[in-house]
Image (spheres, grey):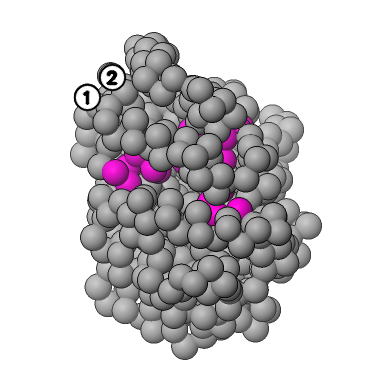
Amino acid sequence: MRSTGFRRTLAAIGVCSCLALAASACGSGDDGSAGGKTRITVNCEPPKSAKVDRRFFEQDIASFEKQNPDIDVVAHDAFPCQDPKTFDAKLAGGQMEDVFYTYFTDAGHVVDINQAADLTPYLKELKSYDTIQKQLRDIYTVDGKVYGIPRTGYSMGLIYNRKLFEKAGLDPDKPPATWDEVRADAKRIAALGDGTVGYADYSAQNQGGWHFTAELYSQGGDVVGADGKQATVDTPEGHNVLQNLHDMRWTDDSMGSKQLLVINDVQQMMGSGKLGMYLSAPDNIPILVKEKGGDYKDLALAPMPGGKGTLIGGDGYMFNKKDTPAQIRAGLKWLDHMFLTPGAGFLGDYARAKKNDAPVGLPEPRLFTGAADAKDQQVKKANANVPVENYQAFLNGNRQLRMKIEPPDAQQIYSVLDGVVSAVLTKKDADIDQLLGDASGKIDSILARS
């Protein structure tokens, strides 16, 4: 799954109508030259409805083209950046942009179906490449060859309401570090009454499976074995995840009676001040404030309870296999300018973001290392406009956690696990052992077909 804040997960572009002779064709059917310039098509431009982000994106393309007068960048927009329903069709039909957005979980698939250009011979021309976190670079590396460049990352944590913690007699500076503590704190928060819910979780639209995976990682478990061929959900760790949800829902009554929730439901509960805790990435925080009525001072972020792991995700760009060498070089220059220069560009110009009332100082996982990271953090700190102290526990705790990407065939697997989580939260007598056994068999079948 993706995180949900637009500036960090910026999801834009659906299928465009690709006319074979149009100058702004979707794919790379020509040599990429136009009027003596190298032309590249790129996607994930913010839609017109996102006025500020759209303006930033256009400004950055204009400044890039001014610095590189031999390159013409044609940006495509729509929502979302990558539609799972049309992504493969665009690839197979030759309609994909020259430089195209992907989730981390797409990298291996795009390479497997032979739709990605090998960037390895050109990496020396990407100034920022060696400054990017190795674990993120490795996501786009297959059999020693590099097929993509990471742009952002996220990791899951526990968002909680400091005001409700205080009202329940809990210390807001000491968020729960174990699932037993989450359960105990949720019970005390729910006891405040007046419709207050202690802990909420997703259980529909594949989002329940996504969160089950994150909760399993937090306890040291995994969804799929190291060989990628067998499910590993029917384990003590998997049982613990479901038993904890069952007990909070039915024994403690700390999760409320309304279930089959999705992200918008839970965000609305948190923004209205009626929810104590839920799992999310940091980019949920500005959504809670700007769209759901929350207040930055009341919202804090802690690391994943359990202390053993957390789910990470993110995005990057890959290159069309039909790209010419000139287009690949131009695309890499564009990525450096737009996304990979510390303290500058679409995601890194913190001064510009602050001036336009966009949040600066949220605890996103660090993209860079070394001197590049130091510069990025320095500029971010100088322009911070949110209470960074509310996120210190998250930053400190994340250093101790195993960072794990989503499983293969994630969406299909999440669909299976959705049914497991929803059953536990809607049926008091749900048989956890049977649910996990059935899910394991279904996941094995999915893996066997992939």
- Residue lying at 49% horizontally and 40% vertically, measured from the top left: 251
Q: Nearer the viewer, mark 2 or mark 1?
A: 2
Q: Which residue has dot 1 on it?
A: 227
Q: Quadrant of residue 235?
A: top left
User: How would you rate the neighbour count of disc 2 (Cα within 10 Å): few for under 14, some for 14-19, many for 20 or more?
Assistant: some
Q: CA distance from mark 2 to mark 1?
A: 7 Å
Work out whether 402 lies above or below 53.
Answer: above
Q: What's the amino acid at mark 2?
A: Gln
Name the foreground residue: 415 vs 236.
236
Name the foreground residue: 413 vs 152.
413
Residue at disc 1, secondary structure:
loop
Q: Quadrant of residue 392?
A: bottom left
- Residue lying at 71% horizontally and 36% vertically, measured from the top left: 16
Residue at disc 2, secondary structure:
loop
- The residue positioned farthest toward the right in the image shown: 49
Relative side of 39 to 225, left or right: right
- Residue lying at 50% horizontally and 55% vertically, measured from the top left: 186
Q: Which residue has dot 2 on it?
A: 230
Work out whether 144 lies above or below 274.
Answer: above
Residue 283 percent coordinates (x, y): 54, 61
Q: What range is drawn magenta here? A: 197-219
Relative side of 130 to 377, left or right: left
Magenta stretch holds residue 203: yes
Work out whether 384 lies above or below 411.
Answer: below
Q: What's the amino acid at mark 1?
A: Asp
Residue 427 percent coordinates (x, y): 56, 25
